[in-house]
Image (spheres, rainbow, N blue to C red):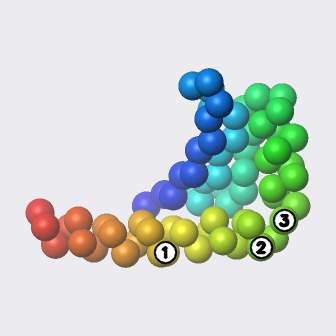
Amino acid sequence: IEFIDSYYFNKLEYTRFSSSVGKYVGFTERGVKIAADWNNNPSLLSGEKAQKEVYCLHNIQIWYNNI
C-alpha cells in the first residue's frame, strides 16, 4: 500500500508526497522549491508518513471485509 498526496495548480501536478519515497518530490521549478522547503520540516514529514497508517491501513481492512 502506498499513500500519495499530490498538489496541483491549473491541472499541473507540481509537488507530490509518496510514502514509498518518504519525502516530497517537485515536478516543476516552483514545485522543486516547495518540496525542498517542506522536506526541511520534520513535523510535516512525520505527519505525512503517519497518514499511511491512519488512512490507508485502516481503510484497506474495511475494503477487504466488504469484498
**Residue type at numbered disc 3:** Asn
The tag earlier along the polypeptide, 2 or 1, is 2
Query: Residue 16 appears at what percent x and percent y?
Result: 65, 45
State which quadrant residue 8 falls in: top right
Query: Residue 38 appears at what percent x and percent y?
Result: 81, 56
Marks 2, 1: nearer the viewer: 2
Which quarter of the rendering shows the N terminus?
bottom left
Per the image, the residue denoted by label 2 is 43
Residues at marks 1 and 3, CA–CA distance in whole angstroms: 20 Å
Image: 61 above or below 2: below
Disc 2 and disc 1 in contact, CB within 8 angstroms: no
Total labels drawn: 3
Task: Report whether 24 appears left or right of 2.
Answer: right
Mark 3 nearby-residue class (10 Å; few <14, some 14–19, many ≥20): few
Which quarter of the rendering shows the C terminus?
bottom left
Mark 2 nearby-residue class (10 Å; few <14, some 14–19, many ≥20): few
Query: Which labelled disc corresponds to residue 53?
Result: 1
Residue 64 versus residue 34: which sits nearer the camera? 34
**Residue type at numbered disc 2:** Ser
**Residue type at numbered disc 1:** Glu
Disc 2 and disc 3 in contact, CB within 8 angstroms: yes
Task: Report whether 55 appears left or right of 64.
Answer: right
Task: Report whether 65 appears left or right of 62.
Answer: left
Query: Which labelled disc corresponds to residue 41?
Result: 3
Residues at marks 2 and 1, CA–CA distance in whole angstroms: 16 Å
